[in-house]
Amino acid sequence: MPIKNRIAEFECEMREWRHDFHMHPELCYEETRTAGIVAEKLRSWGIETHEGVGKTGVVGVIKGNGSGTGSIGIRADMDALPMQEVSNPEYKSTVPGKMHACGHDGHTSTLLGAAKYLAETRNFDGTVNLYFQPAEEGGAGARTMIEDGLFERFPCDTVYGLHNMPQLPKNTFGIRKGPLMAGADSVTITIKARGGHAAMPHMAIDPIAIGTQIYQAAQTFVSRSINPFDTAVVSITQFHAGTANNVIPGEAILNASVRTMTKEVQALIKEKFQKLCEGLALANGIEIECEYREGYPVTSNHDAQVERIISAAASVVGMEAVDPETEALMGSEDFSFMLEERPGAYIFLGGGDETHTHSVHHPEYDFNDETLTTGASLWAALVEAELPRAG
């Protein structure tokens, strides 16, 4: 099964949708224009449509031919990033300081293409729920939709998601069983010491000196506390202290990013930060606050669903273009919340070629339009394989 002929016939439409979304990017929970267009198109194709799910999310429900009770959920994210686009495509962002630098404009258009095809053909038996999600970029839109009753109101037996990947060759797929993307946590450490004159350091308790100890110790969490066969990243990304060159400040603040692939490693690093701060506070006779915030969980694929989407992907591009053991990434993804609620899988769609070399979140990044029909065909093939018609 190559690119579905009917999907190929409206490739130009899909490009137009994508370019329009690209020109009008909207940030977390601001996706009112995007959501409105999505809802309008779904309704025009005769799809049952629900707006305002998880604030600005949209859900389309397509019933197939037959009396089957099986169901599948497919998710696409809609939000953009607070970045200035520096390249100049004809469809360049018209909103200063905002751009689709992660390809969510392409994800939305890909799922719309699949929706149009599935609504026309209904060559499946069961229910397809299309989840157009807001606020993936730091806003935990998947969790917000779930808290708004997503899976109770629009239930699915399995759930799937897709992300474009410029590092992979165009129109190839990459996936793996188990952890695919990291969990992302953040830490804020506030050192409340005692300020004083820089010429009389013995009269003060220097928070900068204590902060440097925290920085150095944090570098050993991964190298000396975690099994070398496990994976984690701990990065101190901010260190704020002081206002003048002759003043020892009374306070210093550090911020850190933590990426892990298992809950066990996450718990270990959290404990290491807390005990480090408790110990330094006691040793220096001061107060140190350690706020550890658990963010997006690990995006961990379920084995059976990985095998199913691999089969669907191979039917579209051939097995030679599907990598079933692609490298895991330390980036994070809030689709992880959905995978904690339902069995499913998350897959990468390659978009790299000679003109698409920039990574996502780069100010010159642009989604590769030549992958739109491939992504839409994947969803169509998956639905028809998962929910086959009798006879």
Image (cartoon, grey):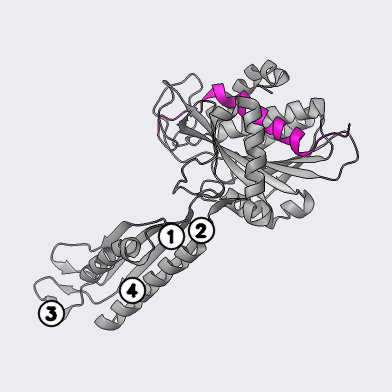
Task: Give the spatial CA distance, label 3 vs label 2.
Answer: 40 Å
Local packing at callout 1 (Cα closer than 10 Å; few below 14, some 14-19, many 20+) is: some
As measured in the structure, the alpha-carbon distance from the residue carrying label 1 to the one carrying label 3 is 33 Å
The residue wearing badge 1 is: 186
Q: Give the foreground label among 3 and 2.
A: 2
At label 2, the amino acid type is Gly
Residue highlighted by disc 4: 276
Kindly identify which numbered label has been placed on residue 202.
3
The reply to whether the C-beta atoms of the residues labelled 4 and 3 are less than 8 Å apart is no
Question: Disc 1 versus disc 4: distance between alpha carbons?
Answer: 16 Å
x, y (%) of residue 321? 54, 28
Residue at which label 2 appears: 295
Residue, x 54% and y 26% (percent of image)? 171
Mark 2 or mark 4, earlier in chain: 4
Q: Element type at marker 3?
A: helix
What whole-number distance in Å separates the C-alpha atoms at marks 4 and 3? 24 Å
* SS at badge 4: helix
Mark 4 or mark 3: name the one nearer the start of the chain.
3
Segment tinted magenta in the rendering: 363-391
Decide if residue 323 is on the left or right side of residue 239: right
Q: Is residue 298 left or right of residue 307?
A: left
Query: How many residues crowd around disc 3 within 10 Å: few (fewer than 14), some, or many (20 or more)?
Result: few
Residue at screen point 57% across, 32% down: 105
